[in-house]
Amino acid sequence: MPAPGGVEQELEARELGRALNRFVGRLGQLERDVFISRYYFLVPLEELSARTGCTQSKLKSMLFRTRKRLYTYLREEGYC
């Protein structure tokens, strides 16, 4: 049986996953930990603040800047 999304969509999803991994791999340790914790594991900001010692305001700013850089990166890679 063919995959529900088709072979092309499967390949595109894999490539996007690789691009995301490359982007995350280039982040600094703190930024990477915060980004992965927040968006992959859905850790609340309060918990991230307690773990890192950063204020919630600083974490929000860090995540905002990281998302902006991710958008730029994905545009350069041809995904947006």
Image (cartoon, grey):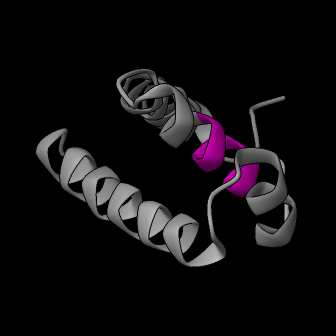
Pick the front one: 53 or 32: 53
The answer to whether 74 is drawn above or below residue 22 in the figure is below
Res. 26 in view: yes
- The residue under the point 40% across, 61% down is 67
The answer to whether 49 is drawn above or below residue 11 in the figure is below
The range drawn in magenta is 33-39
Q: Verify whether residue 34 appears in magenta.
A: yes
Residue furthest out toward the left: 76
Residue 33 location, x and y as percent?
64, 36
- The residue under the point 43% across, 71% down is 61
Residue 7 location, x and y as percent?
57, 30
Pick the front one: 33 or 71: 33
- The residue under the point 74% across, 61% down is 49
* Quarter containing the C terminus: bottom left
Pick the front one: 25 or 21: 25
Tell me where residue 42 sits by quadrant: bottom right
Residue 76 location, x and y as percent?
12, 44
* Quarter containing the N terminus: top right
Tell me where residue 65 sits by quadrant: bottom left
